[in-house]
Structures are given as C-alpha cells and as structure tokens.
Amino acid sequence: MSYITTQNQYIQVDGNQIAYRELSKGKSALPLVMLVHLAATLDQWDPKLLDLIAQEHHVIALDLPGVGASQGKVADTIPGMAQQAMDIIQALGYDRINLLGLSMGGMIAQEIVRLNPSLVHRLILAGTGPRGGFEIDKVTGKTFKFMLKAALHRVDPKRYIFYNHDQAGRLEADKVLGRMAQRQASHADKKFRIPSFLVQLAAIKRWGKAEQDDLAFINQPTLIVNGDHDMQVPTENSYDMHNKITGSQLIIYPQAGHGSIFQYAEHFAQELKSFLAE
C-alpha cells in the first residue's frame, strides 16, 4: 500500500477521536513517529518520501488534537503540543519510538525529548530550530507574507514557504505538490481550520521569544536536516542545533529551502535509513 491511498485510522485519547495513518511495510523494531509542520494535516506529507521510508520502517503520522480529522483543541504552547503527542503515542501502545519532526513538528519533537527523554531512541529534526532561535519569532510574519505572494500568483502557499522563489524552486514545488495532489477525496483528511492555524502561529511566536535553549537535554543520536536557503526557519538554526547537540549529524541540501526533505526525497530516505540502522 502507498501513502497516497492510506486512509485515516482513529483512536480515542482523553475523550477525543484522534486521526493517524500507519504504513507498516518495514520490519523495524521501533516505529518512526512523524510530526508535521504548521497548518498541515496528514495530507501534507510527501507520499513519495513516506513510501521510501516505509520500505524498511514502520511509519506513524499523527494529527494532533484540533488538526485535520482529530477532535479537541490545538494546544496554545509548543510544550502543550508535545504533551498531546506523547499522550497519543502512549495510547497507541508505545513507550519507545524514533521521532521525526518537520518545522513546527521539530519544535514539538524537541519538547517531547525535554519532557520524556526515555521515549525517544533516535531524533530527526528537519527544517526547524531551537527555542529562542534565530527569527523563529518572525515565522508568523513570514507566513502571512508568503501566503499573500501565493494568493497574488494563485498558487499553493507551500510554493513560497517551502521552496526557493526562482524558476528551479517552482519546478521542485510543482513536483512535490503534484504528488500530494494525487490523493483522492475519498482518502483525504479534513481541511485545516483557520482558528487552529492562528493558535499554532501564536504558539510558535511565543516559543521563539522564549529564552534561548542550549539543548543540553538532547542526548540521543540526532540527525539535523535542512536546505541551504530556508527562508521560513533560517538554515542558521540548523547549524546552531548541530553545534549544541553533542554527536549530532548535519545534512544541508544545496539549492533547497524549507522543504528539502521532500525535494531530496530519495537521498533523504536513504540517509534516514542509514541513521536509524546505526
């Protein structure tokens, strides 16, 4: 089965119906839990990337409360979202996982490690930054700027949030967004709601304005990934995390931005498999 045809499954957590998707082609001992970016549902994962990862790993993608088809309310802080994610993981029956967070998902992943370090075996932080990191408090303004530019050009906002604004970036965006668009309506998640989006934006801004983090609490093997020109969460943050997290690995993809793991799906999937197999 491909991710593009994988439908939502549901589990009750704290009285709310929570949506998730599961790909279990691989025989990995631990599942790889994946936390998505701002204003995204389960439909915003690149199906090509998830299919490649699932060849060897058990993949679980989550809609946190208030997102997509999940009931409940979006937490108003990043640590609050981390607690929600941990509650879902526990309800699914896991006390040990590998964890990948993209953008806001990477911020949540860091807070999960802070709250429960024994839960995470290996950590992957993609297109993200640390608490109090460079320009993270400016994500709100950047998001609205890129959304306006997308509206003027009548394209998906991810065209400008995730990919370089030149012709090469347009071609890469078209490839990835085209893959996502192949999902049929019968297999689609519920649309993201504007009030939930605004709560997420406020949580990111609050987290970005908080005291700068030294990340000393992250002791598990960590892979940090980004493009060399991330305009949403500046690439500088990836170098900063790499310097602060002892023994971490860093991959910076050329001519790429916030969506580097989708743009370089084949290469990243192979690097991820190698990292998880170490």
Image (cartoon, grey):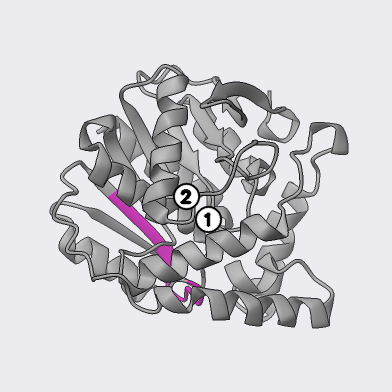
Determine which residue is flagged by label 1: 264
Cα separation between marks 1 and 2: 6 Å
Q: Is residue 201 above or below residue 41?
A: below
Residue 22: assigned label: none
Which amino acid does the dot numbered 2 rest on? Answer: His
User: In this view of the protein, which residue sits in the foreground, 24 or 213?
Assistant: 213
- Which stretch is magenta? 223-232
Determine which residue is flagged by label 2: 267
Identify the residue shown where x is 72% and y is 27%.
7
**Residue density around tag 1, few if under 14, some if 14–19, many if 20 or more, within 10 Å:** some
**Residue 234 visible from this viewpoint:** no
The quadrant of the rendering that contains the C terminus is top left
The answer to whether residue 74 is magenta is no
Number of numbered tags placed on the structure image: 2
User: In this view of the protein, which residue sits in the foreground, 110 or 53?
Assistant: 110
Mark 2, secondary structure of its residue:
helix
